[in-house]
Amino acid sequence: MQPEFVPLAALGDYVARADEEMRARARAFFEEIRRRHTVREFSPEPVPRDVVETCIAAAGRAPSGANQQPWRFVLVGDREIKRKIRAAAEAEERAFYAGKASPEWLDALAPLGTDEVKPYLEIAPWLIAVFAERRNAAATGREQKTYYMNESVGIATGFLIAALHHAGLATLTHTPNPMAFLSEILDRPPSEKPYMLIVAGRPAANAQVPKHALKKKALEDILRVV
């Protein structure tokens, strides 16, 4: 198939900026994103659905391998479904903390104060279940294997977390292992792999952040210029 192209200039999407403006915008984004914190105490105060849907739409603009866009999002606000998700997640977490996790893994988690009790899965107004498509037809119109599935969905999930923070919401990423219960509760097809559960809402008035989570590596520790 012969690829077709559209000139970037014709789209009108790219905006050329002077160096100083780029510096200012980069710094402004850094200042905003550095205020993002993971919390485990959420307010039950409602959040408009369209706010979260717009953030998911932003996630859908992420780049993906072969443009297959292998992400699927299930937005959960129903109380009974959230209750089922909490019950299933806590069952997996009890097994995790009771022996499935290695001592080294538990030591790594200890400074964060996590345990098997997950009330926020019911309290927060929204849960976003992220699924990765093993096979899809987005790029060619015919079903085929998804390439770079995990990388693509990971990028989209990063977009989503940044968008939710930008909108003014707090988030928590939750990855119980295994997560097959999400497919069952949310009636997802076998072609989709549960990837992550994102809790989204306003932080509770008494929300706390572990001091350990405030320790971020300095730029010189994560960057090498050659």
Image (cartoon, helix red, strand yellow):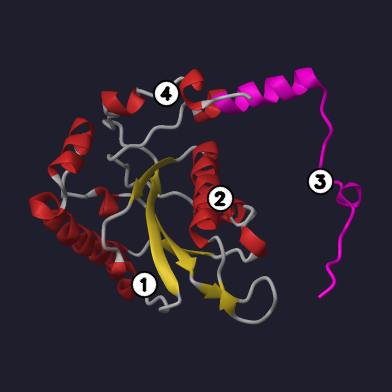
User: Cβ–Cβ below 8 Å for labels 3 and 1?
Assistant: no
Decide which of tag 3 and tag 1 comes sooner along the chain.
3
Q: Does the magenta portion include 92?
A: no
In percent of width and height, residue 108 lies at 22, 36
> Farthest residue in the left direction?
98
User: In front: mark 3 or mark 2?
Assistant: 3
Q: Marks 2/1: CA distance?
A: 21 Å
Q: Nearer the viewer, residue 7 or 78?
A: 7
Question: Element at badge 2?
Answer: helix
Count of numbered circles on the image: 4
Decide which of tag 2 and tag 4 comes sooner along the chain.
2
Depicted 201 relative to depicted 218: above or below: below
Look at mark 4 in the image and give the residue it sits on.
217
Mark 1 neighbour class, 10 Å CA radius: few under 14, some 14 to 19, many 20 or more: some
Look at mark 1 in the image and give the residue it sits on.
186
In percent of width and height, residue 118 lies at 21, 50
Q: Is 132 situated left or right of 108 in this image? A: right
Q: Marks 3/1: CA distance?
A: 36 Å
Q: Nearer the viewer, residue 157 or 119?
A: 157
Q: Nearer the viewer, residue 88 or 2?
A: 2
Decide which of tag 1 and tag 4 comes sooner along the chain.
1
Q: Does the magenta portion include 20?
A: yes
Q: Marks 1/4: CA distance?
A: 37 Å
Q: Marks 2/4: CA distance?
A: 27 Å
Please name the residue shown 41% across and 75% down the image. Answer: 188
Mark 4 neighbour class, 10 Å CA radius: few under 14, some 14 to 19, many 20 or more: few
Look at mark 2 in the image and give the residue it sits on.
55
**Quadrant for the N terminus in the image:** bottom right
